[in-house]
Image: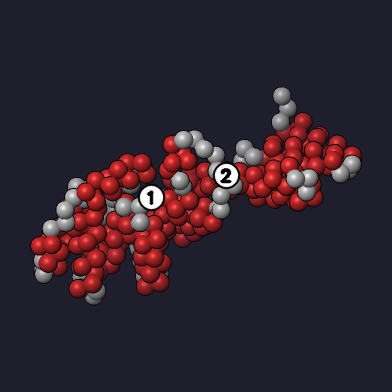
Amino acid sequence: MMYKKRTLLPISLVLALGLSGCASNVEETEVQITAPERMYQTAQKSLDLGNILKATRVLEALESRYPFGPQATQVQLDLIYAYYRAGNNDQALASIDRFLRLNPTHPDIDYVYYMRGLSNMQSDQNMFHEMLEIDRSDRDPQFATQAFNDFKQLLISKPNSLYAADAKQRMTALKNRLAKHHLAIANYYFERKIYVAAINRSKQILESFTDTGSTKNALEIMKASYIALKQDDLATKTDLILKQNFAK
C-alpha cells in the first residue's frame, strides 16, 4: 500500500490542533468498528480533519486487533504521525524505534528518520521560552544532538530524499543550538575564573561548530582567558585570528 505522506505543520499550529482534538468527544462506536478497512478510513478522515485524539484511538485499536493485517505497516506510520501531531513525543519515538527494528529496509525509511528528527527537535523545544524569547541555551542538548544525528542518518540513507533539503536546514539550526550550548558553558567557566576549562570548551566550538555564529564569541573567551592566565603569546595569536576573520 502506498504511504500517504502528510504535510507537517508549524509546531504552534500543531499544538493548537492537538488541543482542539482533545476537546472532541471520541465516539466509542468508531473504535468498535470491526472491519479493518472501515476503521482505517475513519482514522484517515480524522487525521485529515485534525481530530488527532480520535485518529489515534482508532489507529491504536486497529493495530491491536489486526497486527498482521494488510494495513499493519501503514497503521504504524500513521500512528507515528498522529503521536507527533499530538505532541506525544515519547510515544512517537517509541513507535519509530519499533518500526526501525521491524522494517529496517522499508522504502519510506527516510520519512521515519525525518519524523524521528522532528520528534526529537520538538522534545528539545520549550514553547513558553520561545514565546517569551527567553534564551535557555544552557539546557541539556540531548534531544537536539539526537535530532541532528537523525537528520544526518536520513541524508546518509537517502541523499535524494524528498525530505533532504528540509533536513539540511534543520541540521544548520541544530548546529547553532548546540554551539550556543557549548558557548554558555564556556561563559560559565570564564565567569568563575576556570580559564583552562573555558579555553577547552571554546576550542570545541571552533573544532565542531566553526560555521556557526558562536565562533567569534568563542575566540573572544579564549583571548580573555589567555590574558587572565598571562599567556600573552597565545592571547596575541587568538587576537590575530579574530581580526583576520571578524574585522570590523
Residue with the mark numbered 1: 162
Q: Residue at x 16, y 56 (%)?
A: 26
* 202 and 87: which is toward the camera: 87
Q: Residue at x 22, y 61 (%)?
A: 57
Amino acid found under the numbered disc labelled 2: Ser
Q: Position of residue 47 (x, y in %)?
A: 22, 52
* 177 and 21: which is toward the camera: 21
Residue with the mark numbered 2: 137
Residue 177: quadrant of the picture: top right
Question: Which quadrant holds the N terminus?
Answer: bottom left
Q: Position of residue 152 (x, y in %)?
A: 51, 55
Here the colouring is: secondary structure
Q: Residue at x 28, y 48 (%)?
A: 18
Q: Position of residue 27 (x, y in %)?
A: 13, 58
Amino acid found under the numbered disc labelled 1: Leu
Instruction: Answer few, some or many: residues within 10 Å of disc 2's Cα (few below 14, many 20 plus, some between 14 and 19).
Output: some
In the displayed structure, would residue 83 be above or below residue 226?
A: below
Residue depth check, mark 2 versus mark 1: number of the one nearer the observer: 2
Q: Is residue 63 left or right of residue 170?
A: left
Q: Residue at x 46, y 47 (%)?
A: 125
SS assignment at label 1 = loop
Instruction: Answer few, some or many: residues within 10 Å of disc 1's Cα (few below 14, many 20 plus, some between 14 and 19).
Output: few
Q: Position of residue 80 (x, y in %)?
A: 33, 59
* 87 and 113: which is toward the camera: 87
Residue 74: quadrant of the picture: bottom left
Question: Which quadrant holds the C terminus?
Answer: top right
* 165 and 88: which is toward the camera: 88
Residue 143 seen anywhere in this rendered image of the structure: yes
Residue 1 seen anywhere in this rendered image of the structure: no
SS assignment at label 2 = loop
